[in-house]
Image (cartoon, rainbow, N blue to C red):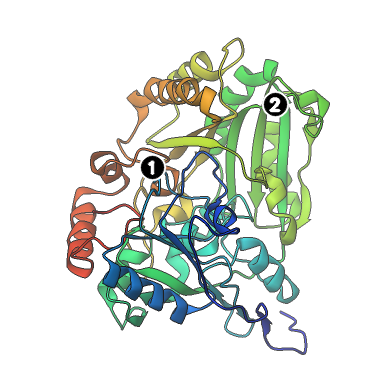
Amino acid sequence: MSIPEDPKVHVAPAPLPARALLPTNEDYDRACLGFNLALTKRPQMVVMARNTDDVAAAVKHAGAAGMKVSVQATGHGGGVQVTDGLLVNTSRMQSLTVDPHAMTARVGAGVMWREVIEAAAPYGLAPLNGSSPSVGVVGLTLGGGMGPMGRTFGFAADHVLRLRLVTAEGAVIEVDAEHEPELFWALRGGKCSVGIVTELEFALMEVADYYGGAIFYPGSAAEAVLNAFGPWAATLPQQASTSLALLRLPDWDEVPEPLRGRLSLSLRYVFVGDDESGAALLGPMRAAASPLFDLVARTPYTAIGSVHQDPEGPLPGWDRGQLLRELPPEAVETLLAAAGPGVDLPLIMVEVRMMGGALARPPQVPNAVGGRHAAFSLEVVGACPPPMKEAVTAAGNAVLAALEPWSTGGTLINFQGDATSPQAVSHAWPEPTWARLQELKHRRDPEGRFAFGYPA
């Protein structure tokens, strides 16, 4: 691997003072705004933190004032509303260091995956980001983090090396396999609100590009493509990661005309290997039906967001998921009946994402990631402005209920959506893991200071 002369990349913003914003302040609304506009955030105070010391001071202030503490970087994750207390906004915490010799990155709590991708690319390295590069690194990783190369390398949480944490007392501690091992286990995949992670260090993969992209099919091909998908997926080696989405994209000018306002399918495919092998593996799906667009090609990793093409701007959204143990023909028939052609469905996406491979293997240092033994993840997503909330929620839950006969009974915590009751959240982990996370939460945050994450 060729390494440029500069052995490290460091990106940091100009120093900014921490700001405490009240509802009467001009910038308060902007500080509360997250990616998901369907979530209400109206805390008593927002602290715009610029470093770990600011976060610690905010937590101590909240403790003295008897306030709950929540946290937000990009506002993509979690279905929890914030109506009081103190919100720590970490979006200004933009420190980023890439060490190409150690093949690691260290990021502040506000860094998005896009920044890591761009900083690692000059060294032929890539992070295990999620499908959207605009999601925050810390939030996705604490929930496990299943991305476009998941079957090849596993969950993002499996490759975490160290965390810096502000505790419920406002203390700053370093967490790794030797220091605070119980916290190290829980924070990697447990989405556990025992403290605020202000810095994260993780391994990078030696990947400069990939063979992959998206193939779009017309809705009329849904039966043929879905019936081909299950048997084809079973033949894939772990170098290949894939998902298939039924899309109902809006009738907007920015949506390509063949996809606009009608049902289509998107096959997502990432192969970490040579073009010839990747194309040979993809052959059965290319033959399943005539595509509208075939965008699969050798692609630099900096364009990884083009595989899923997730929306970049804020919008009101609703999502929920469940895990499937298999996808037999009967499940495909049921999925088509619930979300295929001829069904009037107020959902943007119904996605089946293949798991297995490295996702099924626990890391060398055990962590709390749940759902490893599922064969597929099923996720439903809808745009959810207030007039549509009831219809979108009902439609999404109906699709999940239809596929329940093939469910493992589990979920992935990052796809939990607004199902935030303790009973619903407990399905994201095996019962012993859930009990262990709860015990740790009660021990490390006995007053329930932190009102984010899930185990409680």
Asked if labels 2 and 1 touch by Cβ distance under 8 angstroms, the answer is no
Q: Residue furthest front?
A: 24
Q: Name the residue located 58 percent from the left edge and 25 percent from the top edge.
A: 226
Quadrant, the C terminus: bottom left
Q: Secondary structure at mark 2?
A: loop
Q: Name the residue located 20 percent from the left edge and 59 percent from the top edge.
A: 436
Disc 1 marks a residue whose amino acid type is: Ala
Q: Is 209 placed above or below 305 here?
A: below
Foreground pick, 81 / 255: 81
Instruction: Tell me which numbered mark, 1 or 2, is placed earlier along the sequence.
Output: 2
x and y percent of residue 121 in the render?
Answer: 72, 70
Q: Which residue is mark 2?
A: 250
Q: Nearer the viewer, mark 1 or mark 2?
A: 2
- The 10 Å Cα crowd at callout 1, few under 14, some 14 to 19, many 20 or more, is many
Q: Is residue 207 visible?
A: no
Q: Secondary structure at mark 1?
A: loop
Q: Which residue is mark 1?
A: 374
x and y percent of residue 159 in the render?
Answer: 47, 69
Q: Is 172 placed above or below 151 here?
A: below
Q: Is residue 29 visible?
A: yes
Q: Quadrant of residue 232?
A: top right
Foreground pick, 55 / 24: 24
